[in-house]
Amino acid sequence: MLYSTFLLLLTVANLIVVHSQSWAGVYTAGTACDDAPCCCFFGQVVLTNTSANTYTVNSPVSGSDCNGITTYSGYLHTSGYKGWMILFSSNTSVTLHSDSSYVTVKNWDDPFCSVLGVKNGIAKLDIDTLN
């Protein structure tokens, strides 16, 4: 009986564990962003924690709206699983998935300029599809 109670408590404890967010890492950008009218992240996007709730973002970029710039370096400001940053004068929101496996970067000025990034080392998702 004691063993059964222990197993039940262990199972319940595992079910209610809260996973903390983990923004920092290297992400692979999807190809859903249309670089004809946009400036898009591509390849490896690196998020590095610089202070509480602030991350540096470094990534190659391409597209007609990049004005000849090929590398983006900027800041991501976060609160929990939500964040925001300015990408070449466009206000973007960033959402970290609850298991920290991918981020969605949503460009509010032009939805076709949005992108999904999958954290390296995570099982591959269909990164060309935004929900």
Image (tube, rainbow, N blue to C red):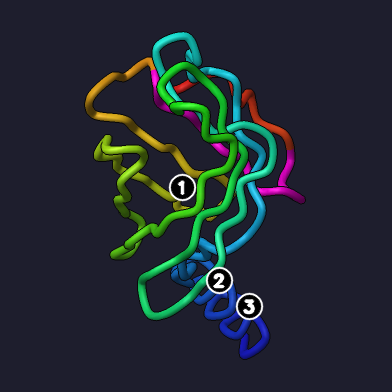
Q: Left or right of 113: which side holds 27? A: right
- For marks 2 and 1, the one nearer the N-term is 2
Asked if the stretch drawn in magenta spans residue 42, the answer is: no
Q: Is residue 112 above or below residue 25?
A: above
Question: Looking at the picture, how far across and down is residue 47, in whole percent?
Answer: 55, 59
Q: Residue furthest front?
A: 68
Three-letter amino acid code at the position of disc 1: His
Frontmost of labels 3 and 1 is 1
Q: Residue at x 56, y 83 (%)?
A: 5
Question: Looking at the picture, how far across and down is residue 103, in whole percent?
Answer: 48, 44
Q: Residue at x 63, y 78 (%)?
A: 7
Q: Left or right of 94: which side holds 61? A: right
**Nearer to us in this view, 43 or 23:** 43
Q: Quadrant of the N terminus?
A: bottom right
Contact, CB < 8 Å: mark 2 with mark 3?
Answer: no
Q: Which residue is mark 2?
A: 14
Three-letter amino acid code at the position of disc 2: Asn
Mark 1 neighbour density, 10 Å: few (under 14) some (14–19) many (20 or more): some
- For marks 2 and 3, the one nearer the N-term is 3
**Nearer to us in this view, 15 or 85:** 85
**Nearer to us in this view, 68 or 72:** 68
Q: Which quadrant of the view contains residue 123?
A: top right
Q: Quote the CA–CA distance across marks 2 and 1.
A: 20 Å
- Judged from the image, the secondary structure of the residue bearing numbered disc 1 is loop
Q: Which residue is mark 3?
A: 7
Q: Residue at x 48, y 76 (%)?
A: 50
Frontmost of labels 2 and 1 is 1
Q: Which residue is mark 1?
A: 97
Mark 3 neighbour density, 10 Å: few (under 14) some (14–19) many (20 or more): few
